[in-house]
Image: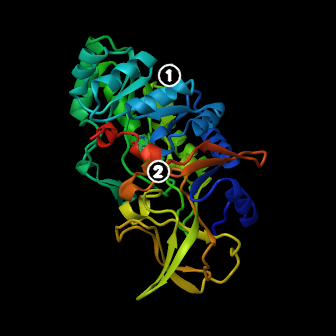
Amino acid sequence: MKTTFVTKEQLEKITQKFPTPFHLYDEKQIRERARALKSAFAWNPGFKEYFAVKATPNPFILKILQEEGCGVDCSSLTELMMAEACGFSGEEIMFSSNVTPAEDFVLAKKLGAFINLDDRTHVEFLQKTAGIPETICCRYNPGGYFSISNAIMDNPGDAKYGMTKEQMIDAYKTLQKMGAKRFGIHAFLASNTTTGEYYPTLARILFELAVELHQETGAEIAFVNLSGGVGIPYRPEQPEVDIAAVGEGVRKAYEEVLIPAGMDQVAIFTELGRYMLAPAGCLVSRVLHQKHIYKEYIGLDACAANLMRPAMYGAYHHITVAGKENAPCDHLYDVTGGLCENNDKFAIDRSLPEIEIGDLLILHDTGAHGFAMGYNYNGKLRSAELLLCQDGEVQLIRRAETPQDYFATFDFSGFFSEK
Ligand SMILES: *Cc1c(COP(=O)(O)O)cnc(C)c1O
């Protein structure tokens, strides 16, 4: 059974001050998850998690993670600006982008961030636009299919990211000539994996590549960046990834591949987003309408503009009706938002307790890639973000958008000029 981190009583109190819909984050759980990850990799002295800002781009969340010793992984100019504003600098910032504009590289270089190059041609592009830093990372794509114990996990051969092995070797040689002294290796081969084998399998591939690159080019490998991809159990029947076992699995590969090659100084980095934040957030929404036609519909005051994953990927998000946690799930509903899009459904044919207008619904696991993927289709406004602090207080960490925000990028002056 999936449980929520707030009760109906707490939510009714919160909604007196902050109207629904809103995303609510649990500070306690964020800290616990950051500590569990850190402890799983404590065997590696250089270990650092660079939280993937795109998952939950909110400065208050980034500050909590910063206090837990995390850095940030940015993918764009504005994410770099947010990192800078939060006080991250230098090697606390990873810049893992693709199809990168020149100005993004310029800011990343100015901040002293680790720059992770997605393509062979970005070597010369970076040299021309921002200059080559002493430490630089390249992103690897092994091509083909990526499988774990005969199960195909994903299809890197079809993915736009990274460089081939030949390009990696060539890039390292060229970067050395341009003055680079230390190198990183990065790859992201499968998303939302719930097997504990993902990181260990990926690590082994990257460690073997690290040895080969070092022997082939003489480059000093400073870090291996395992990127994101560790998943969470969105469904009640799915198991939780055992992060301590994942850390041990990576250690085993490290001891079998890197240590015998004399490469015992390599730091392990991660760029987790979903694993860190998804379960520590939920979307809270109130039932506006009920509709009985060929099916039973529950209409919420939230819509896909607040949480796009179900509409975009058919993703499952568990739903709890606040206060009815123990009621029998003997009704079958489609739970929808109000977009003029028939895929604006948070759940289809979901067994839930009997729902009444005014009930509060809790959509689980929206703490990562939830608010962040929001948009303004149908003129819908982005919701507020709230933080349930460790002392039980609730803090507004981003206000809800207003119509003024929606209209802010228009210049209306022509409409209202005197006739
Ligand atoms: C999206 C992304 C991440 C985070 O992925 P999760 O699935 O949230 O862990 C990390 N690194 C890069 C380069 C990404 O694009």
Seen at 39% across and 64% down, the residue is 311
Seen at 60% across and 79% down, the residue is 355
Location of residue 336 with respect to 147 vertically, above or below: below
Q: Position of residue 34 (x, y in %)?
A: 62, 41
Q: Position of residue 343 (x, y in %)?
A: 36, 69
- In the image, taking residue 130 as reference, residue 120 lies left or right, namely left
Disc 2 under 8 Å from ligand 1? The reply is yes
Can the viewer see residue 284 in this picture?
A: yes
Q: Position of residue 385 (x, y in %)?
A: 58, 48
Point out which mark residue 91 bears: 1
Residue at the far bottom in the pictured view: 294
Location of residue 28 with respect to 5 vertically, above or below: above
User: Label 2, on which residue?
Assistant: 369
Label 2, label 1: how many angstroms apart (C-alpha)? 25 Å
Location of residue 247 with respect to 13 vertically, above or below: above
Seen at 56% across and 31% down, the residue is 47
Seen at 49% across and 51% down, the residue is 371
Badge 2 crowding class, 10 Å Cα cut-off, few under 14, some 14 to 19, many 20 or more, is many
The residue type indicated by label 1 comes to Glu
Quarter of the rendered structure image containing ligand 1:
top left
Residue at the far front in the pictured view: 419
The residue type indicated by label 2 comes to His
Q: Position of residue 350 (x, y in %)?
A: 51, 78
